[in-house]
Amino acid sequence: MGTPLGDFIRAKRDSIQPESFGLPDRRRRRSPGLRRSDLAQRAGVSVEYLTRIEQGRDRNPSLAVVNALADALSLDAAERAHLRLLAKITSGACVIERPPSPPNRHVRPTVHDTLQLLEPGVAFLTNRLGDLLAYTSGFELVMRGIGLLETERPNLTRYVFTDPYAKTFFADWDQVADEQAFDLWRGPSVAQFQQLVAELAHIAGTELTGRLDHHLPPPQVPLRLNHPIAHELRWQRERMELPVTDAQELVVLLPADEATALAMDRLRRQPHHTLRAVP
């Protein structure tokens, strides 16, 4: 049986094209990605030891080995932090004995000012649990009346998996569901992750739980929305990670075609709303 750590390493290795690391492209391979022997060599461990980690037969690699694997896989800062967390979970060192502390909902003034500069664009601030912490008037125009913003504390993950209208509003609902599940799986903490999953699982069922073992980010594709007034809107997304201490992400939606840009112009002629921070 695999482990969260081994599954992540194997999935990440399979996603890497050998030529991106200056290795020859072995097109006749039956399995995709980087060879186990290549990763072992880059990390300075034996192939047999790497095999034990990936297959879950070694559940307690040292921090030095975990860091060497992170280097060998060229993980970014968020992925490195997640790899260390998975190592703790796999070894049993990460035990939850008390209710989790609430996720950080504080929006720093400079982040709020950055959102203000994006007006009247479509942008929002969120954490990996899906909480909407602040958003522009453009975002409110796009999302008004679908049920997302009509709650006291809007949460995109909860909306995607529990509101029946979400499958109509998001033209590519499966893609959006994959994205939300992956973000949820990545943090911000194991305790908060488990709490929200427990809350949603009895409603969403396998639509959510079946996605939690996917260890690689979904492909980035345009976001298509079936807007109740403006009809189909297509967006490109720019995601900007805030510092680790914030555990937040700023997302900007940019029109992917002229029809979307024109539709937004029409929506903006409606009564103006200002940037909103969610309490």
Image (cartoon, rainbow, N blue to C red):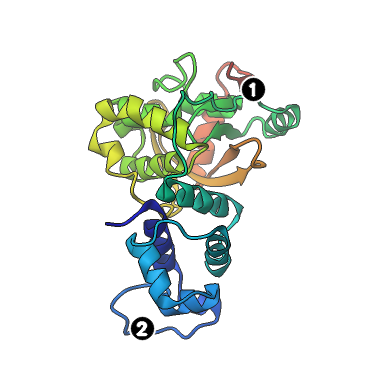
Res 275 label? 1
Look at label 1 and name its amino acid: Leu
Q: Position of residue 85 (x, y in %)?
A: 50, 47
Q: Position of residue 167 (x, y in %)?
A: 30, 33
Res 140 label? none
Is residue 71 visible in the rendered image? The answer is yes
Residue at which label 2 appears: 27
Do tag 1 and tag 2 residues touch (Cβ < 8 Å)?
no
Q: Residue at x 33, y 48 (%)?
A: 213
Q: Is 163 rendered above or below residue 20?
A: above
Q: Quadrant of residue 111?
A: top right
Look at label 2 and name its amino acid: Arg
Q: Secondary structure at mark 1?
A: loop
Q: Residue at x 34, y 24 (%)?
A: 199
Circle 1 Cα neighbour tier, 10 Å, few/some/many (<14 / 14–19 / ≥20)? many
Is residue 35 visible in the rendered image? The answer is no
Please report whichever mark, 1 or 2, sits nearer to the chain's N-terminal start: 2
Q: Is 115 rendered above or below residue 186?
A: above
Q: Position of residue 264 (x, y in %)?
A: 53, 33
Circle 2 Cα neighbour tier, 10 Å, few/some/many (<14 / 14–19 / ≥20)? few
Number of disc labels: 2
Q: Quadrant of residue 163?
A: top left
Q: Is 262 rendered above or below residue 58?
A: above
Left or right: 238 as drawn, with respect to 204: right
Q: Residue at x 41, y 26 (%)?
A: 229
